[in-house]
Image (cartoon, rainbow, N blue to C red):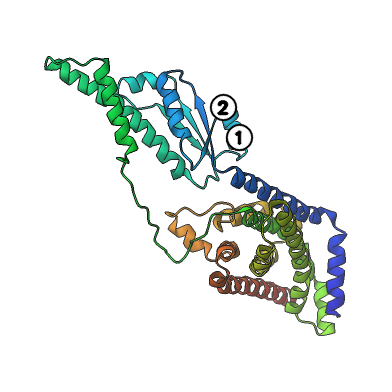
Amino acid sequence: MRLDYMLKARLSGSFREPFSLVFVLLAIIISVSAAVIAQEKTTSGLVVAIVSEDEGEFSRKFIDYLSDYESFSVREMSYDEAVRLLRQDRLEAAVVIKNGFSEKIAKGEFQDTLELMTSPSSQAPATISEPVVNNVMMLWMEELSIITTKACLLEHGKTYDALDEAQQRDKIRKLWESGAMVNVVRTELDDGVNNYTADGPFETCVKWYGVLCMFYLIVGASWVLEINKKALRVRMRQMGTSQWQVVIVNSLAPLVICVSGYIIAGAACVALTGAGAEKLAASFAPMCLYLIGLLGVTLLTASLLKNVLSLMFLAPILTFLNGVLSGLLFETPSWAYVLKWLSGALPGRWLCGALSSPLKYLPWALLCALVWMGAGIGVSSLLARRQQLQ
């Protein structure tokens, strides 16, 4: 059995199956689109919507305070528009100033005055929430100070007129401006495991493409079922070809297609977002190792199944789990220690790390790819041998 002929036949067969190839095309389109959206957010910076349901003096003052911050830009809009843009991931957050805000602040109250909504992919919730809380507290403390001072002076028979109030407000304002707020130095310790940099447009493209490739590999894994058929096993014995050789040759076809799609998606991302071409070259090896690991997962899964319908059913489930647990779609929360530990067995975990630190994570990516590929080949060969004995 000529293995090179088998590879050519598998490749030509793959290109004659538009059903499965359409998923590679979709993976390219979706990943590049995600990169373009990420580029737009990077260019425009952090955009925060302000929805004011209050028409009082203090709501206007609160908006002016937030507008002075340089770490994000403020846009006033309606509630419906803010929710729509958040769902489209075009805003980092939306601050809703509730009705009665000015009235409560004037009374020295601050409970239930604001609502903060953030997008699922917001990379800087603290950057937005801290200024919001600080400025509400500033307004509340200023008014509470005026109310308390006035009540205290009147209780002791002293006068407190408009000039006194203006002078006190001026002193409080100077106090804020002089840096009286508490400055907290935040230090994140290196835990040696998940220290990924924030995703740029290119990293977003790579991760989305990596997630969607798994769907294509599983849906198009009917070849795994074919190589275990009795007629093919008999022919393999006659030609002196081992099961593992046939598996590797057949695995090369989807690998070549996925790598080619990655090059197309990466080149399009570089052209549309201005990302450096060196990123495409640097991420080539991590992506190849990731795809080899996915092939092992696919081979193992398909070997245990009986028909193509089962593959179609499992494809979206495994794709979702791979994207979430690996950290390709969302970074694993710091408190999810068990998930972090389990994600070490997934190829996507090491792809994430290799995108930011290739030399550190590539050995682990290589090990993970070899383990999964070895497990897939081993299980496939074992099941073929069992069927041969039956």
Q: Where does label 2 land, which residue?
A: 77
Q: From this viewpoint, is residue 144 visible? A: no
Q: Looking at the rendered structure, which numbered label has been put on residue 85? A: 1
Q: Residues within 10 Å of mark 1 (few under 14, many from 20)?
A: some
What residue is at 63 percent from the left and 53 percent from the top? 204
Which one is nearer the viewer's eye here, 121 or 108? 108
Residue 269 percent location from the top left of the image = 71, 54
Which one is nearer the viewer's eye here, 232 or 262? 262
What residue is at 44 percent from the left and 20 percent from the top? 99
In the displayed structure, would residue 369 be above or below residue 195? below
In the displayed structure, would residue 77 be above or below residue 203? above
Residue at the limit of the structure toward the left, as seen here = 156
Residue at the limit of the structure toward the bottom, as seen here = 240
Are the residues at dot 2 and dot 1 in contact (C-beta closer than 8 Å)? yes
For marks 2 and 1, the one nearer the N-term is 2
Q: Is mark 1 on a helix, strand or loop?
A: helix
